[in-house]
């Protein structure tokens, strides 16, 4: 398989400008080009930064975890308190419910097995 030839940024920009010019000429009628907004002067390329050292797995884990925790929508104090009460109430109810049926089945099996 032959490699696909990639274009440089300058080449892509030049093609886009030519395409805009051709579109402006064809839509403008008698070759009138649409005035484009002036572009700011191109900045000089900054010196290349030294390659950043790769983090090891543990450092990356903590870094990414911290980033994810910043995105979390934390509940207010009142919401947290309300939800804690709900969880506690449901837990107590389920413990009583399961405890009752455990006691009931224990008594039934004691009667059946004698």
Image (spheres, rainbow, N blue to C red):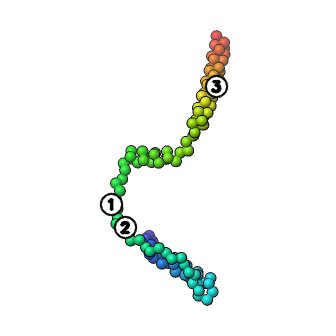
Image-based side of 56 in relation to 87, left or right: left
Closer to the N terminus: mark 3 or mark 1?
Answer: 1
User: What mark, if any, has residue 50 been given in the picture?
Assistant: 1
Outermost residue toward the top? 114
Mark 3, residue position: 93
| Left or right for 105, reference 14 | right
Give the camera-side residue of 71 and 62: 71
Percent x, y for residue 9? 44, 72
Q: Quadrant of the C terminus?
A: top right
How far is the residue under mark 3 from the one under mark 2? 66 Å
Q: Residue 98: image x %, image y %?
A: 63, 23
Q: Residue furthest left?
A: 50
- Look at the numbered disc 2 and give the secondary structure of its residue: loop
Marks 2 and 1, Cα distance to the nearest angstrom?
A: 12 Å
Q: Nearer the viewer, mark 2 or mark 1?
A: 2
Q: Residues within 10 Å of mark 3 (few under 14, many from 20)?
A: few
For this rendering, which residue is in front, 68 or 75? 75
Q: Is residue 70 above or below residue 40?
A: above
Where does label 2 land, which residue?
46
Q: Residue at x 44, y 74 (%)?
A: 41
Query: Within 10 Å of the Cα at label 1, are there few (<14), some (14-19), or many (20+) other Cα atoms?
Result: few
Q: CA distance from mark 3 to mark 1?
A: 61 Å
- Horizontal and vertical percent for residue 36? 54, 78
Mark 1, secondary structure of its residue = loop
Query: Is residue 39 in sight in this rendering?
Result: yes
Quarter of the image holding residue 66? Answer: top left
The front one of 96 and 77 is 77
Residue in the image at 37% along x and 67% along y: 46
Residue 2 at x, y = what percent? 43, 72
């Amino acid at each position: 398989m032959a490699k696909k030839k990639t274009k440089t940024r300058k080449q892509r920009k030049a093609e886009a400008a030519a395409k805009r010019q051709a579109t402006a000429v064809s839509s403008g009628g008698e070759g009138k080009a649409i005035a484009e907004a002036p572009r700011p002067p191109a900045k000089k390329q900054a010196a290349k930064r030294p390659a950043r050292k790769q983090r090891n797995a543990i450092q990356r884990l903590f870094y990414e975890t911290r980033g994810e925790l910043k995105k979390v929508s934390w509940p207010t104090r009142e919401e947290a308190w309300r939800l804690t009460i709900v969880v506690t109430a449901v837990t107590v109810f389920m413990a009583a419910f399961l405890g009752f049926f455990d006691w009931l089945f224990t008594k039934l099996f004691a009667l059946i097995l004698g």
